[in-house]
Image (cartoon, grey):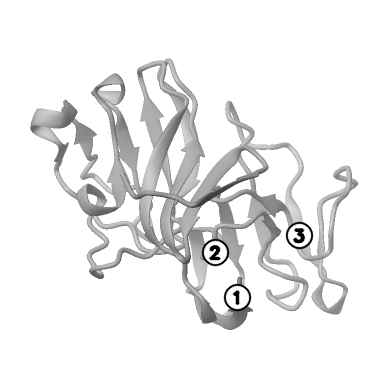
């Protein structure tokens, strides 16, 4: 575990850091329920393999990961076989990539390790459906009012089902969540290690954000 000189609780995710190197504890459901989470850190060695980026415990043995491959669910479903067995088959989870994890145990969080992306942070979304998240571990309204085609939509996970409120882009007016309490035209609020499903109705989208903690 990386030593930390400061700890900050952001929403329900705990972010610990020593300068820009550290780890993020991301809340997950137990008892076999699904959680939509994401990788909020970049690995120090550039290796995005889940064995290198996620710290699991024996309490999470038999956890499974479901990853969207851009057109359908991947048929390769990584499963955690405890500290002795690790993940099989292995998988890559890039910075800002969201996925479902199904945790059969009672553990309430999993830990990502790596570095915080700073400076100019680039994003890209292909046409169609993507499971995405902010690339910096701070609670934020995502992706921003300036991102998206008119009629693009975003779906959020409540922990047990898809939220009945679907966020929709209205062009220059930004994002609207049909009266969500405290809604922002920048989009839904995403905690560190959270995620959304983005339905891009047009061409690929690219944008950048500056992050200088």
Q: Are marks 1 and 2 in contact (CB under 8 Å)?
A: yes
Q: State which tag comes first along the sequence, 3 or 2.
A: 2
Provide the residue designation for mark 3: 168
Q: Secondary structure at mark 2?
A: loop
Return the x and y of residue 141 as percentages of the image width and height.
Answer: 72, 59
* Measured Cα–Cα span from mark 3 to mark 1: 26 Å
Q: Which residue is found at the position 31% from the left and 44% from the top?
A: 1
Q: Of 39 and 17, which appears nearest the observer?
A: 17
* Measured Cα–Cα span from mark 1 to mark 2: 8 Å
Q: Of 36 and 10, which appears nearest the observer?
A: 10
Q: Secondary structure at mark 3?
A: strand
* Measured Cα–Cα span from mark 3 to mark 2: 23 Å
Give the numbered dot on residue 136: 2
Image position of 188 (left or right of 79)? right
Provide the residue designation for mark 1: 211
Q: Which residue is found at the position 35% from the left and 52% from the top?
A: 113
Q: Quadrant of residue 12?
A: top right
Residue 155 can be seen in this image: yes
Q: Residues within 10 Å of mark 2 (few under 14, many from 20)?
A: many
Q: Is residue 204 above or below residue 181?
A: below
């Amino acid at each position: 575990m990386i030593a930390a000189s400061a700890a900050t609780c952001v929403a329900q995710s705990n972010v610990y850091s020593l300068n820009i190197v550290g780890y993020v504890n991301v809340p997950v459901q137990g008892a076999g329920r699904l959680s939509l989470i994401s990788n909020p850190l970049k690995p120090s060695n550039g290796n995005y393999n889940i064995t290198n980026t996620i710290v699991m415990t024996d309490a999470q043995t038999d956890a499974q990961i479901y990853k969207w491959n851009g057109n359908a669910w991947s048929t390769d479903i990584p499963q955690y076989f405890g500290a002795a067995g690790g993940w099989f088959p292995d998988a890559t989870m890039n910075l800002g990539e969201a996925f479902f994890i199904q945790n059969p145990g009672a553990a309430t969080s999993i830990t990502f390790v790596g570095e915080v992306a700073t400076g100019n942070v680039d994003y890209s979304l292909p046409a169609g459906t993507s499971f995405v998240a902010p690339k910096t571990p701070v609670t934020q309204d995502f992706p921003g009012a300036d991102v998206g085609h008119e009629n693009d939509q975003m779906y959020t996970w409540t922990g047990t089902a898809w939220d009945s409120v679907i966020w929709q882009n209205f062009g220059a007016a930004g994002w609207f969540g049909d009266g969500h309490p405290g809604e922002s035209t920048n989009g839904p609020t995403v905690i560190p290690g959270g995620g959304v499903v983005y339905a891009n109705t047009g061409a690929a989208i690219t944008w950048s954000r500056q992050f200088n903690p």
